[in-house]
Image (cartoon, grey):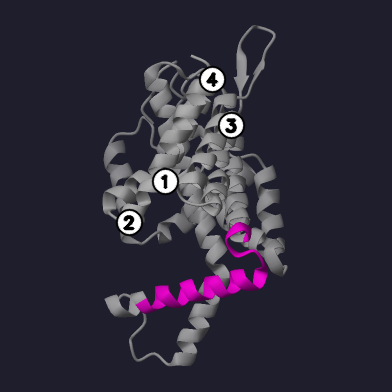
Amino acid sequence: MNFSLVGLGAGLVSALLIAVVAKATPLAMLLFLLAPIPVLIVTLGWDHRAGLVASLAGGIATALALSPYEGIGFAVGTGLPAWWLGFLALLGKPQANGAIEWYPLGRLLAWIAATAALTVLATAIVASGDFASFQARMRRLADLFIQAQLRTGRGPATQVDSAVLDAIATRFAALAPMFAAQGFTLILAVYVWVGAKIVSISGRLPRPWPYLPATVMPRSALVMLGGAFLLAFVGGFAGVFGLALLGATLMAFGLQGLAAVHQITLGRSGRTAMLTVAYLLLVLTQGMLFIALMLFGIADTLAGLRARMKLPPAPTSGPGPRST
């Protein structure tokens, strides 16, 4: 089938998933969150050109159905990030023996973080126009969030001094790009996994299913982390990008640490119980354990911790999906 027709169909499906959010129901929100999947599927299963067509078609359809602003939002926040990550996942370099060296998962994870940060920055610029409007928007959202926490009893006591609440709201608004990029990095990683899994099950995924627990980001990711930290202290949208990249890169290192848990426990008795306890602790500690995973991920890339361990060999990859 012509890649343009496949891309057109995927773009229209993705735009429809975006449009249903207007229903404001839990199901509509779930469908909205699935919008990038069709773009990823056609990019991974057909051709990266199909992904570009899907992004363009989805943006135009969203602009016609909702508004030009929403169409730009689709392209910036949904279509192009999905296409770009799918394109990277299928990059391969032929070797002398005829085998293909596929794009490393660690580099793909680093690009997921960078893509999330760039998307947060682009969304901030498109939604606000200028930095003062962006700050005001973030402050309003921070005030609404804190008020919601007070009403539900999960935030500070209702008798907290207004000056303290104002300081909390100011700090929360300033760090909003970092939190947003952290969440979007996780979401993008899940999108890539789900899209690749669907395409792999269908038998259309060109590259063999990789061993995900062995994912290690290159040392250039540490440079990205350090640069993001320095850039976060710069004013304007440059500082917004620095905060977003800082949060996104830390999340990526946390995911690397979580992958390491899967690899280190491979072949050990009680592995299922250990992984279950680890995930339960992630939930019960409200993500505090993720800080330890981030630090392990950073140390793993810096010092090659897993390379120094006598870990079991990775399972042989094959053309189909494999348990991780």
Amino acid, disc 1 = Ile
Element at label 3: helix
Secondary structure beneath dot 1 equals: helix
Q: Is residue 308 left or right of residue 194?
A: right
Evaluate whether residue 193 shows in this view: no
In this rendering, is residue 103 above or below 151? above
Residue 127 x %, y %: 57, 61
**Disc 4 vs disc 2: which is toward the camera?**
4
Q: Quadrant of residue 151?
A: bottom left
Labels 1 and 3: the sequence-earlier one? 1
Dot 4: what SS?
helix
The residue depicted at 45 percent of the width and 28 percent of the height is 9
Is 137 inside the magenta-drawn segment? yes
Outermost residue on the top side: it is: 97
Q: Earlier in the sequence, mark 4 or mark 1?
A: 4
Q: Nearer the viewer, residue 143 or 105?
A: 143
- Earlier in the chain: of badge 3 and badge 2, it is 3
- What residue lies at 40% left-to-right and 28% top-to-bottom? 197
Q: Quadrant of residue 17?
A: top left
